[in-house]
Image (cartoon, helix red, strand yellow):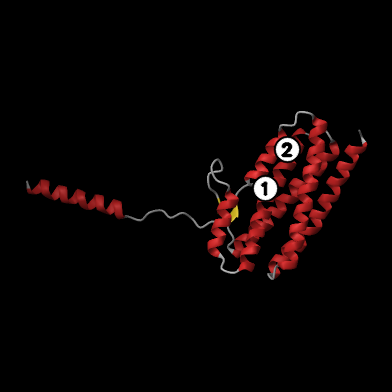
Amino acid sequence: MKHINKLFSFLCVMLALVACGPKERPADATEATEDAATTDTKEAADDANDEKFETNKAESDADFIVNAVGNSYAEIETAQLAGQRSDNSEIKEVARLLENEHNELLKDLQSFAGKKQITIPSQKDDAARKNIEDLNKEDNIRDFNKEWCKDMVDSHEKSIQKFENRLQKTEDPDMKTLVNKALPHLRMHLEKVKACEQRIAEAK
């Protein structure tokens, strides 16, 4: 009976050690990676940054980075879509340029976010996702080419305005460096997609 009691006590101790043992902690990350099917990671990133940053200036810089990262994901995917679907050689060439350069911009934004401890989204936001889905539903390739150029012109005009505004408002010298590096590329992208849009309009 004593042996049984000792064995029972031993088993209880072992179970307690297992239950109280070290638990694996999630690694610190700068990307919000919630389930894409149920959560907009931009919203998750915004919520995390609201808790991190106490000043309006720091929060405004963080908001800009969050939006720029999400937009970069959208630009890359939209460029890839043109590479897959367009029959226009000029559009395909511009799309390759946009994909490559927005990938580089995304890396710069991610690096900046890491240094500043800004939480960023891990994908495009819901509005951009729907826009790309709608564009992909266009069956007529000529209409697809036209809509793709229009989308790229609109998105780059908005991006340039946001980058220029951030350059004026930020007091972070690293942010100024990042924006000054990106703006010439964004302006060049806009010129190229406008040229595509013009040639498609003239070809009617």
Report the amino acid beneath label 1.
Answer: Tyr
Residue drawn at (25%, 49%) of the image: 15
| Tag 1 residue | 73
For the question of whether residue 30 can be seen, the reply is: no
Q: Judge from the rendering whether residue 86 lies leftward or rightward of residue 64; answer left or right.
A: right
Q: Judge from the rendering whether residue 31 lies leftward or rightward of residue 85; answer left or right.
A: left
The numbered mark at residue 169 is: none
Residue drawn at (29%, 51%) of the image: 18
Residue at the farthest left position: 1
User: 43 or 33, which is in the foreground?
Assistant: 43
Q: Are the residues flagged by discs 2 and 1 in contact, CB closer than 8 Å? A: no
Report the amino acid beneath label 2.
Answer: Leu
User: 122 or 101, which is in the foreground?
Assistant: 122
Q: Position of residue 9 (x, y in %)?
A: 16, 51
**N-terminal label among 2 and 1:** 1
Q: Say which quarter of the image contains residue 46.
A: bottom right
Q: Is residue 51 above or below residue 139?
A: below
> Separation of disc 2 and disc 1 at Cα?
12 Å
Q: Position of residue 41 (x, y in %)?
A: 58, 49
Q: Residues within 10 Å of mark 2 (few under 14, many from 20)?
A: some
Q: Position of residue 49 (x, y in %)?
A: 57, 60
Could you tell me which secondary element the residue under label 1 belongs to? helix
Could you tell me which secondary element the residue under label 2 belongs to? helix
Residue drawn at (63%, 47%) of the image: 125
The quadrant of the image that shows the C terminus is top right
Q: Residues within 10 Å of mark 1 (few under 14, many from 20)?
A: many
| Tag 2 residue | 81
Residue at the farthest right position: 202
> What is the count of numbered marks?
2
Q: Judge from the rendering whether residue 203 lies leftward or rightward of residue 141; answer left or right.
A: right
Q: Position of residue 90 (x, y in %)?
A: 85, 40
